Image (cartoon, helix red, strand yellow):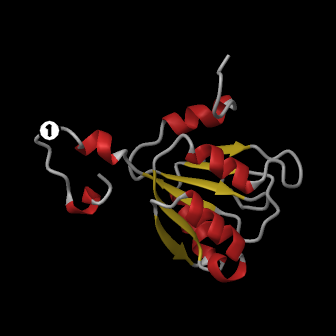
Amino acid sequence: MKRSGILNAELSGALATLGHTDLLMVVDAGFPVPRGAHRIDLAIAENLPDLRTVLGLIADELVVEGVVRAEDVPSNNPLLDQWLRERFADAEFTTRPHAEVLGELAHRAKVVVRTGAFEPWGNIGLFCGVDVPRWFGGEGVVVPDHYASKL
C-alpha cells in the first residue's frame, strides 16, 4: 500500500505522465470539462474535496513553473489569489480572461482534475517545470539565464 501523498490511483498515475511545460487544470465542481479531456473527477459533494486541498497535494508532488487563473481572481477572490501566491511562491503568475480559462486553456490541458469546490473562479492551471538544481546543478553545465536565479 502506498504510504503517503496522493492515494487516488488515477490521479497519481496522471501526475506521473506530466513533463516540462505540460498543463494540468484543477477546477471547481461547475467547470465545463471538454469532452475529449483526460478528466479525473474527484468531486463527491459540495466542497468535497475542496480546491485548496487538491492543489496543495498536487503541489507536493509536482514542480510548478507557472500558475494561470482567470483575470477576475485577484480582484474578485483575493483570498484564493493570496493562497495561490503563498503556495506557489516560486511560480510565475499570469491571468487570462475567464472565457479563455473555460475554453482554450481547458482544451490545452493534458489533465483536468475536477474537485467538489463551490468557489468562484476556482479554476487553476498549473504549468509543470523542472527541478532546476537537479537539472542544471551539474559540474560544467551552463544554466540558461531564466533559470539562474533558481539555483
Count up the numbered dots.
1
Instruction: Please indicate, yes or no, whether residue 106 appears anywhere in the rendered image.
Output: no
Which quadrant: the N terminus? top right
Q: What element carries label 1?
A: loop
- Which residue is drawn at the image coordinates 54% and 75% (left, top)? 96
- Which residue is drawn at the image coordinates 14% and 44% (left, top)? 141
- Name the side, left or right, on which 143 lies relative to 78: left
Q: Looking at the picture, tell me which residue is in the foreground, 93 or 148.
A: 148
Looking at the picture, how far across and down is residue 131, in whole percent? 37, 44
Outermost left residue = 140
Looking at the picture, how far across and down is residue 38, in whole percent? 60, 44
- Which residue is drawn at the image coordinates 52% and 63% (left, top)? 67
Outermost right residue = 45
- Residue 9, compared with residue 30, is above or below; it is above
- Name the side, left or right, on which 78 lies relative to 132: right
Q: What residue type is labelled 1?
A: Glu
- Name the side, left or right, on which 119 lies relative to 128: right
Looking at the picture, how far across and down is residue 84, in whole percent? 60, 63
- Which residue is drawn at the image coordinates 72% and 49% (left, top)? 53
State the image quarter where residue 72 is shown.
bottom right
- Residue 14, compared with residue 59, is above or below; it is above
Q: Looking at the picture, tell me which residue is in the foreground, 111 or 8.
A: 8
Q: Looking at the picture, tell me which residue is in the foreground, 86 or 42.
A: 86
Q: Mark 1 = which residue? A: 139
- Residue 23, compared with residue 96, is above or below; it is above
Crowding at mark 1 (Cα within 10 Å: few <14, some 14-19, many 20+) = few
